[in-house]
Amino acid sequence: MSAPGISKRRGLTYRMREALSGYAFVIIWIVGFAVFTLIPLGQTLFYSLNQVTVSATGINLQFVEWQNYTRALFTDPTFVELLIEYAVETLFSVPIILIFSLIIALFLNLDFKFKGVFRTIFFLPVVITSGPVIQELVSQGAATVPGFAFSDTITNFLAELPTYLSNPIEYLLTSFILILWFSGVQILIYLSSLQKIDPSIYEAAAIDGASAWESFWKITLPSLSTTTIVVAIYTIITLSHFSENKVIKYISGQTFAVGGGIGYSSAMSFLYFAVLILLLALVYLVLNYRASRQYG
Amino acid sequence: MTTKSDLTSSVNRLGKSIRDLPNRATGFSMHRDTIKGFLFGNRTGYGLVFNVILYVLLIAIGFVYLYPLLFMFVTSLKSPADLLNPMVQWIPTEFYSGNYVKAFQVLDYPAKLASSVLISFVPSIFQTIVCSLVGYGLARYRFWGKRLIFVLIMATFIIPAQNTVIPQMLTYRDYGLLGNIFSLILPAAMGQGFKSAIFILIFYQTFLALPKVLEEAARLDGASNLQIFLRVALPAAIPSYIIAIIFSTVWYWNETYLTVIFLEGGIESLPMQLSKFVQAYENLYPPGTVNIFDRLNEAVKLSGTFLNILPLLIMYFILQKWFVESVERTGIAGE
């Protein structure tokens, strides 16, 4: 028994023991992160500064400093174009997906028969979306409602725009349904957030004479502002990681191409990563600004 | 001249007729109110007009949404003659199963199906177990660096696979792991599996929401940390385990970028075989030796695609409740 007044403890304090137990649970992730993410990330960065050739026994490195980066940005005609197209496509797709998922979630939040059937239908694409399936559907022209995407006025209008604007718009029109297919998870997130809004707020507003339209804009949307940020970030990341993404396909193509090589594709993947971060930051700032403005 | 008694009696008659007024709508206005309620909504329902608009809109959107699938299914049933026939759009003249037979062979279906199941399921189990451990540790213990770990977890979610995959592949090559399923199992078993960050967050939210009193009671009874986890926390989080396993299986099944890089030449999955469909078809039916009806056409390709998603569809329809209610159950939408 320790007498009062003895302040020095032998051994570990409770806090330290708790921390050790916590570390015990988490240590496997930390090790895995170091081995499978951090080190390869550093190695990719290192490769991007080299010209890498793969031989049967190992790899040969030749230090070229920033050459891969300058080549990707300034010499390679397709990469920058693909990057801009990717950025524009993503910035167009995100609002479409957000608005569509919100509308469907609002519908599904109502009370009607066969609600479960519709929920199942709208979530289905999440389960079947894979690279080859999507590629097959796009090449067969099944990704859009026919007749809508190819009208004359639209093709004439698109011919006027520069390539990096007209290609994304054309992509949006021809793959419209596929863009909607990316909204499965988002619908569910919005749905569960909608259900968390307290119904008594709506009742209070109705007593004060608010119409359904007003209560939507003043109650529902502000309550969903945090969710919207989460959904937007998730959407951008899903779109950017999808294996049919143009930039990703170009990078993989260049990895083993004669003129490319691992160093070059590593540099491109870091540039792509930078653009991804920029898009995320942009969308986050825009939505955060709107959310904070609403609360004054 | 109206006398006082005249006035009194007319007031009395007026009062009586007012008293005799029914206090509900009768006659014509009763029917009018019922009809209005039936059409535009009353206290018990939304009204016919609203319901009709709602169903029409939802069915229209649902049709547009499912249009690719319907197109795929219908086209895959068309015989080659039907494909060439411009009059046949949505209803093939006969139920032609030849496309499926060819696709079945080209996809090497039984073998690839088995290996797909293996590739998807085994890493998922490892990933689920490890993510639950990590989520539990983050939820229940305080230690320095928790913030940092959260940031790093989000980083693993954001970093594209291209930035880490090449050194991994070279390392696997050195260890002879390319084409081996362990190239997928190892990262998953260390928490770096495909989309692990989401599962860690799911388990974190789940364990955070469990009441602490049960664990404290177990601790008072002398249980060790591991025992508390296995006996108290884990059974309470079974729904999250189920959700994590099925989502992880589906995502691993559909992931082609990593599987192509790591597994090419070794164990191969069904989606990988689909991406090589054209070459595989030409291997089985070399171009010079087949007549025009056996050449590769869209119907065969689409039936191959349909066979590809068929296991997933079956799994989805059996487990749809778990898929669709997953977001609510795990509370990942933030409370």
Image (spheres, grey):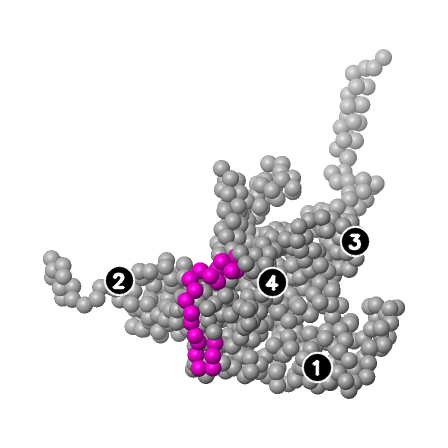
Determine the CA span between mark 4 and mark 3: 25 Å
Q: Which residue is mark 4?
A: A246
| Labels 1 and 4 in the same subunit | no
Write down the chain letter for disc 1: B
Location of residue B217 by image quarter: bottom left
| Labels 3 and 1 in the same subunit | no
Determine the CA span between mark 2 and mark 3: 69 Å
Q: Dot 3: few (<14), some (14–19), or many (≥20) neighbours within 10 Å?
A: few
Query: Residue A81: x and y, percent?
Result: 60, 56
Location of residue B6 by image quarter: top right
Query: Residue A12: x and y, percent?
Result: 21, 66
Tell me: residue B121, above or below residue B71: below
Q: Which circle, 2 or 4, is nearer the viewer?
A: 4
Determine the CA span between mark 2 and mark 4: 51 Å
Q: Which residue is mark 2?
A: A15
Query: Residue A133: x and y, percent?
Result: 66, 70
Q: Which residue is mark 3?
A: A151
A145 magenta-colored: no
Residue at position x 53%, y 68% in the image: A260
| Labels 2 and 4 in the same subunit | yes
Name the amino acid, label 4.
Lys
Tell me: residue B8, above or below residue A85: above
Which portion, as a residue range, is magenta?
Answer: A54-73
Q: Dot 1: few (<14), some (14–19), or many (≥20) neighbours within 10 Å?
A: many
Tell me: residue B43, above or below residue B71: above
Query: Residue B36: x and y, percent?
Result: 78, 44
Determine the CA span between mark 1 and mark 4: 26 Å
Q: Which residue is mark 1?
A: B281
Q: Which circle, 2 or 3, is nearer the viewer?
A: 3
